[in-house]
């Protein structure tokens, strides 16, 4: 029997809980964020999070302004029965309904962690190739975003000076390029980015890190009380 799936806003507390407990990164993305929660039969099963992304030039290749697109930066789910591609699709519909000016969503699958983008392929996203190889910074067994690392020991994030870790204090690991997927939200952008389409990458071996990002449900620990609810915006299916 298909479960009753609900999509609605999620609070910061619930999103943080899902990312720390159910995602291999063990962290929330850098704000600002749009946090959308998912429930099955009334039980909180995780979040889909959208943000402006790591680069201020994320929309430049498509001739769009920064406020016309976003990045899907987290899919953090515990044990569930609905297809992940369905949860993502409904989250995008919910996002588009509440942000009508959005025209494209970008997301990345990291082969370093055994990801090839199967979720996006199942949702008919457009694959446009890989990013350039890069590096990862690790400090105290935690992976850091590049904006959290600076030779000065600080940088400006969201208009505020924030303390950072120096590269010399980190373990630096060279990484593969990430698979880039695009989801157009209107016909004009779809026509434009279809020209960038390439064959989907094939599935790779599932890594331990990826397994760690999909643990069993934590009975008695689902933070239902921390979630926001809406009387007129949520989606039930």
Image: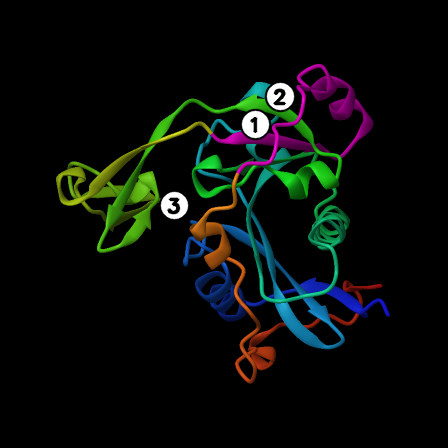
Badge 3 marks a residue whose secondary structure is loop
Badge 2 marks a residue whose secondary structure is helix
Comparing 61 with 89, the one in front is 89
Quadrant in the picture for the N terminus: bottom right
The residue under label 2 is: 62
Residue 59 tag number: 1
Dot 1 or dot 3, earlier in sequence = 1
Query: Does the magenta run of residues contain 229?
Result: no
Residue 110 as seen in the image, left or right of residue 134: right
Label 2: few (<14), some or many (≥20) within 10 Å? few
Q: Residue at x 57, y 29 (%)?
A: 180
Comparing 116 with 105, the one in front is 116
Could you tell me how far apart the alpha carbons at marks 1 and 3 are, in whole angstroms?
A: 18 Å
Residue 158 tag number: 3
Q: Residue at x 44, y 52 (%)?
A: 208
Q: Are marks 1 and 2 in contact (CB under 8 Å)?
A: yes
Q: Position of residue 171 (x, y in %)?
A: 20, 42
Number of residue marks:
3
Which mark lies nearer to you, 1 or 3? 1
Q: Is residue 62 visible?
A: yes
Label 1: few (<14), some or many (≥20) within 10 Å? many
Could you tell me how far apart the alpha carbons at marks 2 and 3 are, in whole angstroms?
A: 24 Å
Q: Residue at x 54, y 38 (%)?
A: 109
Could you tell me how far apart the alpha carbons at marks 1 and 2 are, in whole angstroms?
A: 6 Å
- The magenta segment: 178-204
Query: Does the magenta run of residues contain 181?
Result: yes
Comparing 104 with 24, the one in front is 24
Q: Quadrant of residue 148?
A: top left
Label 3: few (<14), some or many (≥20) within 10 Å? few
Q: Are marks 2 and 3 in contact (CB under 8 Å)?
A: no
Q: Position of residue 199 (x, y in %)?
A: 67, 21
């Amino acid at each position: 029997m298909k479960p009753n799936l609900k999509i609605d806003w999620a609070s910061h507390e619930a999103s943080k809980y899902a990312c720390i407990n159910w995602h291999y990164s063990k962290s929330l993305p850098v704000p600002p964020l749009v946090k959308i929660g998912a429930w099955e039969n009334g039980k909180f099963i995780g979040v889909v999070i959208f943000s402006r992304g790591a680069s201020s030039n994320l929309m430049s290749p498509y001739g769009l302004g920064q406020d016309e697109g976003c990045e899907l930066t987290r899919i953090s789910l515990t044990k569930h029965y609905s297809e992940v591609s369905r949860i993502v699709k409904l989250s995008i519909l919910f996002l588009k309904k509440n942000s009508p000016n959005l025209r494209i969503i970008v997301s990345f699958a990291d082969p370093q962690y055994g990801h090839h983008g199967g979720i996006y392929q199942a949702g008919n996203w457009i694959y446009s190739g890989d990013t350039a190889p890069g590096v990862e910074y690790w400090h105290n067994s935690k992976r850091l975003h590049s904006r959290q690392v600076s030779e000065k020991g600080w940088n400006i994030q969201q208009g505020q000076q924030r303390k950072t870790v120096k590269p010399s204090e980190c373990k630096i690991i060279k990484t593969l390029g990430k698979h880039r997927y695009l989801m157009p939200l209107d016909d004009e952008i779809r026509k434009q980015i279809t020209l960038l389409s390439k064959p989907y990458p094939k599935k790779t071996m599932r890594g331990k890190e990826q397994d760690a990002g999909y643990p069993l449900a934590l009975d008695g620990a689902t933070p239902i009380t921390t979630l926001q609810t809406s009387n007129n915006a949520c989606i039930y299916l």
